[in-house]
Image (cartoon, grey):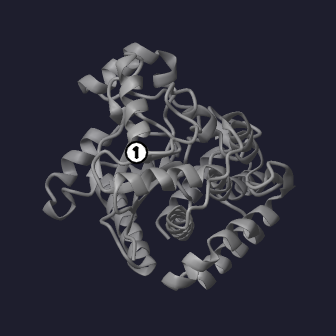
Amino acid sequence: MRTVGVEEELLLVDPETGEPRAQSAAVLARVAQDDADQDVFEKELHEQMLEFATHPQSSMESLRAEIVRCRKEAARHAGDIGCTVAALATSPLPVSPAIGLNRRYQWMADQYGIATREQLVMGCHVHVSVESDEEGVAVIDRLRPWLPVLTALSANSPFWQGKDTGYSSYRSRVWLRWPSAGPTEIFGSAERYHRLIADMVATGAILDDGMIYFGARLSQRYPTVELRVSDVCLHADTAVLIATLVRGLVETAAREWRAGREPLDPGVSLLRLADWQAARAGLTGELLHPATMRRMPAASVVRALLEHVEEALDGTGDLERARDACAGLLRDGNGARVQRELLERTGSLRDVVTECVRHTQA
């Protein structure tokens, strides 16, 4: 069974006002005193962010337990210095992002200017094990049309600098400001994949292969395919659903590759439109169906995704839980809908943040 790991980026906020706090260095200093968490928490581009990474897990029950534990530990460490964490993919309240002081982040600030300064966005990255780079690239080639559906399911960033953006996942729009982000063409082989990355680095527009921000890529550090299209999810159960679907997509794609089935190839231009549609609509409107690239109700496209990975999820015992979780999201809403409903009920973005702190640690 393929193992799965999740990286979540959390927003550090004041527990009373909900305003973002540039305290990651102080939080990580507290973490350094706790040997049990040394390999879990990491710094990120902005000082208002805190990242954690789970260990690889085979069962989704174990993965959920670790995500919940890491969120609670993040809140505990943050609480030691007077702040807390919220699983929000953008800050609902106005913020002036503070870039970390290390040399890499300063290079990015010099190279990309305001695009770097405005990248205070929090994502959920999912790693799934693969047997080789060749299998991994074959998987990436076959995942492409399905990635926007994951964005729609996870969408949790409707607000930006104190205003409603009109998008469900505005994080994904901000993320595309990086020159190496977005959909990719079909690679066809690991050799072509690695050659393209070498050519991209050689341009000097990016610093190294760690700045390859494709929606799906081979991990630098692990024998995994890493998917980076999801917002950090408000609820831990949604993060587990995304991880479940990603593992199902990876296994389904690998089986298609071994069976000699060619990947769907709608082209990068259509994939960019599918990305935009998912970011705009989330689960409240229509998405582009991966097989036809035509609009269909979001619920129909989510059902198509479940049907696509049905055999793989059945094999791991995750099918019924994934169906139930998708039905719950379609009924109750993703993080974007929850945030908007909170604002409608309370009239206060501060209350949106403080209530989302509670959801994060539930």
- Residue 17 lies, in percent from the top left, at 52, 45
Q: Is residue 87 left or right of residue 49?
A: right
**Residue nearer the viewer, 133 or 334:** 133
The residue positioned 39% from the left and 77% from the top of the image is 1
Q: Is residue 45 above or below residue 66?
A: above
Q: Is residue 140 left or right of residue 294?
A: left
Q: Is residue 87 left or right of residue 204?
A: right
Amino acid under label 1?
A: Ala
**Residue nearer the viewer, 50 or 109:** 109
- Residue 271 lies, in percent from the top left, at 69, 41
Q: Quadrant of residue 80?
A: bottom left
**Residue nearer the viewer, 228 or 36:** 228
Q: Is residue 195 above or below residue 75?
A: above
Secondary structure at numbered mark 1: helix
Q: In the rendered image, which residue does mark 1 sit on?
A: 190
Question: Which residue, as the protein is rendered here, is positioned at the far front?
Answer: 260
| Residue 13 seen in the current view | no
- Residue 154 lies, in percent from the top left, at 61, 56
The residue positioned 70% from the left and 73% from the top of the image is 307
